[in-house]
Image (cartoon, rainbow, N blue to C red):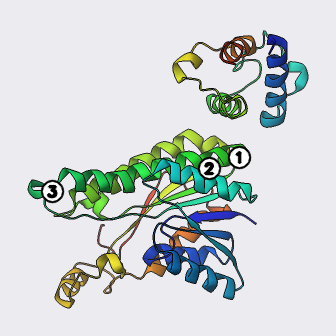
């Protein structure tokens, strides 16, 4: 799966699960500041991804994820 | 209609909770080995005009918990209300307690509730609504001789509930604890009349509790209107702990 495909999936999750406006979701967008996703929101997305792709993501790995792009790259490296 | 799961829902306090919640919700009556008892409770709820199903769930085993939830959800029922009621005792004073008796009680009464709560929260967080109620015990507040394992497990769920309440409050999920005092069930059937009289003497309300006394408070905490109560421990004990 290409990085772009992962981005599209992440975007859909943000829009469908967290009710975020589609136009706001870019690779550069900051999760907390720009998208107003709280820590539990990030957990929600991570759990949805773990289920969809059958991967496991450690909390340690998540600690450095601040932007959509960083989340996409982390997921891409796991799939 | 919201869906509730009552672990250990076929006997004692759990049975009364299943019956009470059966008035307002679809109830899954969780049982480990009491299949026939569970079916009877289901029948009683249905006869009273409610909707219920029995489900086998051994809370001390995560695979069993995951399987049970998978089964519920494949039938279209995510759990909105989780009543962590199932529990066990293996009493002896600490100097004589076998490590296996310690482990077994902690595994079921504490770790088992970790398994069920973790799994149930998935659906609740997604739905942005949920109720988790732990049935602890006054023993978890005051301690009791011969029950260090049981008391530790029941105190443990208080810390668990309070932490969960802080973690998921933003999603309209509440986590509370009901701490029963002496309630007339199989678990207290070893008490003879003299024991009972001694206990009653220490109470403000001069009787042993009924399972329904607990079920009423649980039903109250499940209500929409109770959304501002979270992370609390409510002792239902006739005034034993004041």
Question: From this viewpoint, is residue B127 visible?
Answer: yes
Q: Do the residues labelled 2 and 1 touch (CB within 8 Å)?
A: yes
Q: Which residue reaches farthest top? A: A28
Query: Is B41 rendered above or below residue B81?
Result: below
Q: Mark 3 lies on which chain?
A: B
First in sequence: mark 2 or mark 1?
1
Q: Is A38 above or below relative to B27?
A: above
Please identify the quadrant where the C terminus of chain B is shown: bottom left
User: What is the x, y in percent for residue A67?
Assistant: 71, 13
The chain holding disc 1 is B
Q: Quadrant of residue B140?
A: bottom left
**Residue A32: mark:** none
Regarding mark 3 in the picture, which secondary structure is present there?
loop
Q: What residue does disc 1 label?
A: B128
Q: How dense is the environment of label 1, judged by Cα within 10 Å: few (below 14), some, or many (20 and up)?
A: some
| Residue at 77% in and 34% down | A18
Q: Residues within 10 Å of mark 2 (few under 14, many from 20)?
A: many
Q: Where is residue A5 in the image (x, y as percent from the top left)?
A: 84, 17
Q: Name the residue under label 2.
A: B173
Q: Split into 4 quadrants, where in the image is the N terminus of chain B?
A: bottom right
Foreground mark, 3 or 2, reads 3
Mark 3 neighbour density, 10 Å: few (under 14) some (14–19) many (20 or more): some
Circle 2 SS class: strand
| Residue B79 visible in the shown view | no
Residue at the left extreme of this rendering? B95
Q: In which quarter of the image is residue A35?
A: top right
Residue on which the image places disc 3: B97
Q: Look at discs 3 and 1 and give the one toward the viewer.
A: 3
| Nearest the eye: B68 or B207 | B68
Whether labels 3 and 1 share one chain? yes
Label 3 – label 1 distance at C-alpha: 43 Å
Relative to B73, say whether B234 is above or below.
below
């Amino acid at each position: 799966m290409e990085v772009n495909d992962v981005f599209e999936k992440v975007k859909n999750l943000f829009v469908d699960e967290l009710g975020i406006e589609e136009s706001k979701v870019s690779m550069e967008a900051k999760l907390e500041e720009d998208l107003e996703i709280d820590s539990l929101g990030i957990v929600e997305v991570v759990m949805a991804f773990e289920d969809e792709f059958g991967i496991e993501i450690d909390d340690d790995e998540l600690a450095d994820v601040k932007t959509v792009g960083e989340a996409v790259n982390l997921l891409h490296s796991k799939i | 209609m919201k869906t509730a799961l009552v672990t250990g829902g076929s006997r004692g306090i759990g049975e009364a909770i299943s019956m009470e919640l059966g008035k307002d919700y679809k109830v899954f009556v969780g049982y480990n080995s009491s299949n026939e008892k569970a079916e009877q409770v289901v029948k009683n709820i249905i006869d009273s005009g409610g909707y219920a199903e029995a489900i086998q769930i051994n809370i001390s085993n995560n695979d069993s918990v995951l399987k049970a939830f998978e089964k519920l959800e494949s039938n279209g029922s995510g759990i909105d209300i989780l009543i962590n009621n199932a529990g066990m005792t293996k009493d002896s004073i600490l100097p004589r307690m076998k490590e296996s008796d310690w482990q077994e009680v902690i595994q079921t009464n504490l770790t088992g509730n970790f398994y069920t709560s973790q799994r149930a929260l998935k659906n609740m967080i997604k739905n942005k609504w949920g109720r988790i109620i732990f049935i602890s015990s006054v023993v978890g507040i005051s301690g009791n001789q011969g029950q260090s394992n049981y008391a530790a497990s029941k105190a443990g769920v208080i810390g668990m509930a309070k932490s969960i309440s802080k973690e998921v409050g933003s999603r309209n999920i509440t986590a509370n604890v009901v701490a029963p005092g002496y309630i007339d069930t199989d678990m207290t059937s070893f008490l003879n009349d003299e024991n009972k009289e001694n206990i009653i003497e220490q109470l403000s309300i001069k009787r042993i509790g009924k399972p329904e006394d607990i079920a009423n408070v649980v039903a109250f905490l499940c209500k929409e209107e109770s959304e501002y109560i979270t992370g609390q421990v409510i002792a239902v004990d006739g005034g034993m702990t004041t």
